[in-house]
Amino acid sequence: MIRVIDSHTEGEPTRVVIAGGPDLGSGPLADRARRLNEDHGDFCAALLREPRGVVAMVGALLVPPAAPGCETGVIYFNAAGNLGMCGHATIGLAVTLAHLGRITVGNHRFETPVGVVEADLVDANTVTVVNVESYRFRKDVAVEVPGLGTVTGDIAWGGNWFFLTGDNPVPLTPDCTAPLTEAALAIRRALHAAGMTGRDGAPIDHVEFNGPPDGRDAQGRNFVLCPDDAYDRSPCGTGTSAKVACLAADGKLAPGAPWVQESIIGSRYSLTYRPGATGGVIASITGRAFVTAEATLLRAPSDPYRNGISA
């Protein structure tokens, strides 16, 4: 039996595993995350794929932290595998822990495989996450994409690796999610075929289209395709961190200046940043999450779909 609490952050679902997860042993959190990915893929798939999960859901497995002063360690994953960091899931985690009575309003530290992040619980539903340092790795990278031609964008780190572009094939509207998904998949395949990577050969597994906002009080709108081939319903915390890093590198956004990012469905994050220690930015991301369910998941040995539906 696996006990979970579900939430959504600005429309994007999170499933926090509070009991029944695999024993990953001790040691650095990055090593334990690797063990989850390599040895317990069936567990992750069972949680997030149909019939127990839904498209776009991100899992959050709570583990003992290795870093001092942290409320918990957490390993984020989706149906395609591990994620380094996840902004929406961190907001959802803080709201979930408050729902359980484990934390109260105030600042809390969570250890992720890519570093310690802070979560300031403002109220029962509002959280500001202070992300790991984000930075632009390469500017104005051009890639030839079958069916799209030359697409130019930046490669940036926001806790995951992103290719960010304004070369949008169709408008960034909810009725265009299908062609946007196909275009993002084509770009990701083209990046891989061309050998374009993040630092140290890390694969670029997120593609982000950026454009003007619909609302007058926002600065940008995006569509983000995640590694599980599902689009982010939220504005994507790590993706918007990467966007802010690019804006800062171009001198288009000053430290402390607000940036309001719309998602493809119109939900919003508010961000500011301060300079990072190694030339990047430390983004603070504010959004809202709401608990949607408490459940016990069962995986009967005789269930042909105990590990989810892979097709």
Image (cartoon, rainbow, N blue to C red):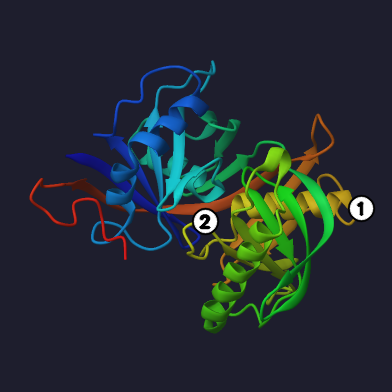
**Which residue ends up furthest to the right in the rendered image?**
251
Residue 220 image point, x, y percent = 72, 67
Mark 2 secondary-structure assignment: loop
Left or right: 28 as drawn, with respect to 135: left
Q: How many marks?
A: 2
Identify the residue at horizontal 71%, vertical 59% (top origin): 194
1 vs 2, front mark: 2
Asked whether the viewer can see residue 218, the reply is: no
Residue 294 drawn above or below residue 192: above
Identity, as a three-letter code, of the amino acid under mark 2: Pro
Instruction: Give the residue at mark 2.
Output: 227
Residue positioned 66% across, 83% down in the render: 170
User: Would residue 142 be found to the left or right of residue 63 on screen?
Assistant: right
Query: Which mark is on residue 251?
Result: 1
Q: Is residue 88 above or below residue 104?
A: below
Residue 285 screen position, x and y as percent: 64, 48
Q: Nearer the viewer, residue 153 or 252?
A: 153
First-in-chain label (1 vs 2): 2
As displayed, is residue 206 above or below residue 59? below
What's the CA distance linking mark 1 and mark 2? 30 Å
Seen in the image, is 182 located left or right of residue 283? left
Q: Quadrant of residue 37?
A: top left
- The reply to whether callout 1 and callout 2 are in contact (CB within 8 Å) is no
Residue 39 on image: x %, y %:
35, 34
Quarter of the image that includes the N terminus: top left
Q: Is residue 197 visible?
A: yes
